[in-house]
Amino acid sequence: MTPWMWIALGLLLAALELATPGGFFIIFFGVSAVAVGLGQLVGVLTPAWAQWSAFTVIALVALAVFRKPLLARVQPINRLPVDSLVGDAALPLGVLEAGGRGKAEVRGAVWNARNVANRAVAVNERCRVVAINGLELDIQPE
């Protein structure tokens, strides 16, 4: 293959990586193809067997060495488990009657909430999360 074909293949593989949901597999083959094209341009990789061997080795080594650190850098930091919400402050977004359900804001996110207290809770009255049932928080006023 000509050097420009290798470089075009590398760019095509990089574009394919952008078009697929994360996983970072194809990009390493794209980088490898560009490297082989550049190696061929400078006259290092002239025989076809050397080009294909270098393509394979560079791609697999890059995949083994760089994929895990790249995923760790791109993926969000481990989030706290939902159970850690127990004890946090909650602000109801509407009036919640005793045993009633509605919405409440906890840590800047809106959750389904149930008032487990014996009295109604006013809008934005400071409450505490006392339990978690699936995607619903049990709250009671402080």
Image (tube, grey):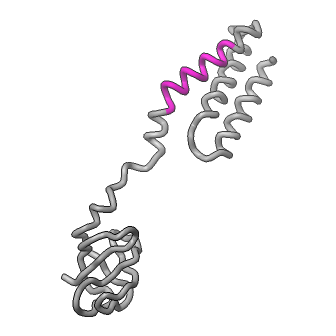
Decide if residue 59 is on the left or right side of residue 104. Answer: right
Instruction: Give x and y (percent) for residue 89.
Output: 25, 74
So how many labels did they put on this image? 0
Please tell me whether residue 54 belongs to the stretch shown in magenta.
yes
Please tell me whether residue 66 belongs to the stretch shown in magenta.
yes
Q: Return the residue nearer the eye: 100 or 66.
A: 100
Q: Considering only vertical position in the picture, is 31 above or below 82?
A: above
Residue at position x 25%, y 70% in the image? 88
Residue at position x 24%, y 73% in the image? 130
Question: Which stretch is magenta?
Answer: 53-67
Instruction: Give x and y (percent) for residue 26.
Output: 64, 34
Instruction: Give x and y (percent) for residue 71.
Output: 48, 39
The N terminus, quarter of image: top right
Residue at position x 77%, y 19% in the image? 3
Residue at position x 38%, y 89% in the image? 94
Q: Considering only vertical position in the picture, is 40 above or below 9?
A: above
Q: Return the residue nearer the eye: 1 or 135.
A: 135
Q: Considering only vertical position in the picture, is 46 above or below 58?
A: above
Q: Which residue of the protein is positioned furthest toward the left in this rendering?
A: 142
Where residue 54 sits, quadrant-wise, is top right
Instruction: Give x and y (percent) for residue 110.
Output: 41, 74
Decide if residue 107 is on the left or right side of residue 38. Answer: left
The C terminus, quarter of image: bottom left
Q: Return the residue nearer the eye: 101 or 76.
A: 101
Taken as a whole, is the magenta stretch helix, strand or loop? helix
Where residue 125 sits, quadrant-wise, is bottom left
